[in-house]
Amino acid sequence: MILSEWGWEIREEESFGMKHYTVQFQPDNLVTTIHAGATLLEAAGQAGVVLATPCGGIGRCGKCAVRLLPTEKEVLACQYIVEHDLAVLVPDSSRFFKQKILEHGIYRKVDRFPSVQKIFFGNPPSQIETLCGLLADKVSVQIVPNRQNETLSSQLRSYQQSGVTAILSRGDCAAQNALPSCYHLTEFEPGDTTKKLYGAAVDIGTTTIVARLTDLNTGQGIATTSAGNPQSQYGADVISRISHCENDSGSEQLHSAVIGCLNDLLQSVARQAGIECGDIYEMTAVGNTTMNHLLLKHPVHQLGQAPYQAYSLDTADRKPKDLGLQINPAGNIHVLANIAGFIGSDTVAAALACGMDITDTKTLLVDIGTNGEIVFGTQSRLLAASCAAGPALEGAGIAFGSRAQSGAIERVFMNGVDLDIDVIDSVQPTTLCGSGLIDAIAVMLELGIIDSTGRFCDRCELDPMLLDSIRRRVITHNNEPAFVLAGNYTKNQWNEAVFLTQKDIRQMQLAKAAIRAGIELLLQKAGANTESIQQLLLAGAFGNYIQKESAVRIGLLPNIPIEKIHFVGNAAGSGAQMALISQDARKMAKKLAEKIDYVEIAHQTEFQMVFSEFLLFPEN
Ligand code: FES
C-alpha cells in the first residue's frame, strides 16, 4: 500500500508504476510517503510539519531551508525534489510557528500529561488495596479501582514473579474536570511494559481520514498515514450520508466503514513504527459533527433537517470494544466536543492548534474542503460558520477534474511566451486538480480569456496583443468555448487535450462564492471587515497546495497582503494530537467548543445577495 499526493491509500498495482519515497522529518520524528517529483515542502505539509513560506514557495525568501541528513547540507524545501528516501532536519528558524504570527500557533507547546499512564512494580504487593495505596503515592491522585477488582486481584497474584505494570487511565475524567482527580486502574500486565505506551490522534474528514501515532512517553509523533473515507461509497457529502441512514442498517454500514478504515490506519502506523496495535492505549478523534455522530453511533437524522441539531455536542469517551477498535482493550477513545450541528470537533481542534483561544491578533482561520469551515476573532470573541463549497475543488463536476493524483495538472502559470503547467509525477497530463483549477482560472482572468462574470470572451473581444501561443488555446468544444491547458498541437489541431469549459468555470464560481460569502457574513457578524484581518490561516490538506496569489486573484480568499496568509497544514490533526498528549489541552478544547459562537450563514436573508456578489471574479 502506498500513498498518493493527498494521502489516498492506493494499491501498488494501481499506481501505474510511479515511485514513492519515504521522507522522515527530524527532530519531530514524523514520517510520510510521497510520490517522486514532489517537493520537500509538499512532503512536509503531508507529514504535518508546517514550514515558513513567506515567498509562497517560489524559492526567493530562503525561509524554508532544511538540512539533509546525515550530511546536514542545506536545501530549500520548496525547491528540493524528492527522488529517493530522505531524512531531513527541520531547524526552528524554518518553522512557521516560530515566526511572530502566532507564537502559540500550530503545535503550541503543551505539557505532556497524557490521560493514560503505566507504572511498574518489581516486587508488587499481593493485595490490590496495598498496591492502590502505593500508586496514590507515586502519581499523587486518588485511585478509583474499577469494577473488575476480582480480575485485577487474580492478575496481580499471578504476576508476582515477573513484576507487574499497572495501567492507569483517566478515561472520561480528563475532560470533565472531575475533582478530586481520579485515575482508573484498568489492567495489569506482566513484567515491565512501561516503554510500550502509544496513542493515536485521528482526524475523520468527510473525504480523507488521517491517523498520527505518538509515543506517549515522549509526546513525539512517530508515524502518520491517511486514506480516503470509505463512507464516500454511500455519499460524497454529509447530507447524502445522513440520508443513507434512513435505510435499514444505513447507520451501521457507515459506522462499520469508518471503524474498518480506522483499524487499517492504526495497523499501518503501528507497522511503520514497529509496534503492535495493542501497544496503543489512547486515541483522540476529531471530525465534523456528522462524522463524530457516525463514529459514536449517535442518531444523525436530526442533523439533516432544520434546525440541524446535534444529538450531542459534548465530548465522549468510549472503550475500544464498544466501537470495535483494535487498540489495547484497556485503552480509551476520546472524541472532542463539537460546536454545532454543522461545525464539529475538527474545527475546535484546528482553532486550538492555532492558539485562537489565546491570541489577540484578529485571525481568520479557513479550512477549505467540500465543507468549508471558518473561524474569526480573538480570544475575547470567536465566531464560526460553515459553508457548503461542494466538491468542485476536489475535482467533481469539472470536465477533466480529479483529486490530486498522478497526471493531474497542479499548477498553471505563464512563462513569458506560453502557458506552463506542473503535473503530478511529471507524466502526461490527463486531469486537473483543485490547485490547478484555481491557477488556471487566475491565468485566464489575467489574459482576458474570461471576464469578471466568468463568461468566455468572444474571439473578437480578445486582446489584439494576445500571444498566438495563447490565442490558439481558445477552442470550441460541443459548440461551447473552452480553453486548452495541455495537449499536443499539430496541424492546427489539439490532440489529447486537457481543457476547461464554461461549465467548469461556473462550478468554480459557485464553490468560491460559497466560501467567500461565508467569510464575508462572518466578518460582518463580528463587526469586522477585510481590513480587520491581521492574519489568515489556511488549514486542511487542500490549503497547503494552492497558490495564495491565485486564490486571491479569483476571489476565493479576501484581498489582503499575501504575507498575512499562512498555510497551517492539518491543524485539526495537530489539535487532536495536543489533546492526546495533554489533559490540559483536552480541557482547553472543551472550553473552546463552548466559547466559539456558531453563526448560521446559509439561512441569513443577506446570504443570497452576498453569494451572488461573490459569484463575480474581482476586476483586475
Ligand atoms: S524559498 Fe521561500 S518558501 Fe522556499
Image (cartoon, rainbow, N blue to C red):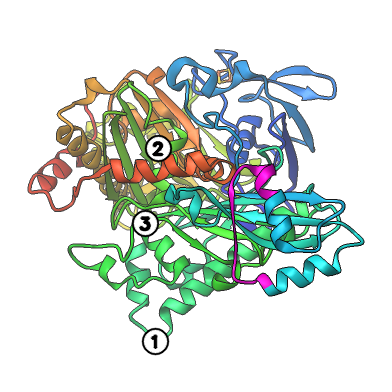
Residue beneath label 3, please?
A: 314
Residue 208, percent from left and from top: 51, 55
Q: Which mark is residue 248?
A: 1
Disc 2 residue crowd, few under 14, some 14–19, many 20+, Cα 10 Å: many
Q: 254 above or below 507?
A: below
**Mark 3: which secondary structure?**
loop
Ligand 1 sits in quadrant: top right
Left or right side of 12 for 241: left
Q: Work out whether residue 273 or residue 449 is closer to the camera in this orientation and state it.
A: 273
Q: Does the numbered disc 2 mark a residue whose Cβ is under 8 Å from ligand 1?
A: no
Q: Which mark is residue 351?
A: 2
| Type of amino acid at the residue the image marks with label 1 | Asp
**Mark 2: which secondary structure?**
helix
The magenta segment? 135-149
Disc 3 residue crowd, few under 14, some 14–19, many 20+, Cα 10 Å: some
Q: Which residue is found at the position 92% from the left and 61% from the top?
A: 161
Left or right side of 176 for 579: right
Q: Say whether residue 138 is magenta.
A: yes
Q: CA distance from mark 1 to mark 3?
A: 27 Å
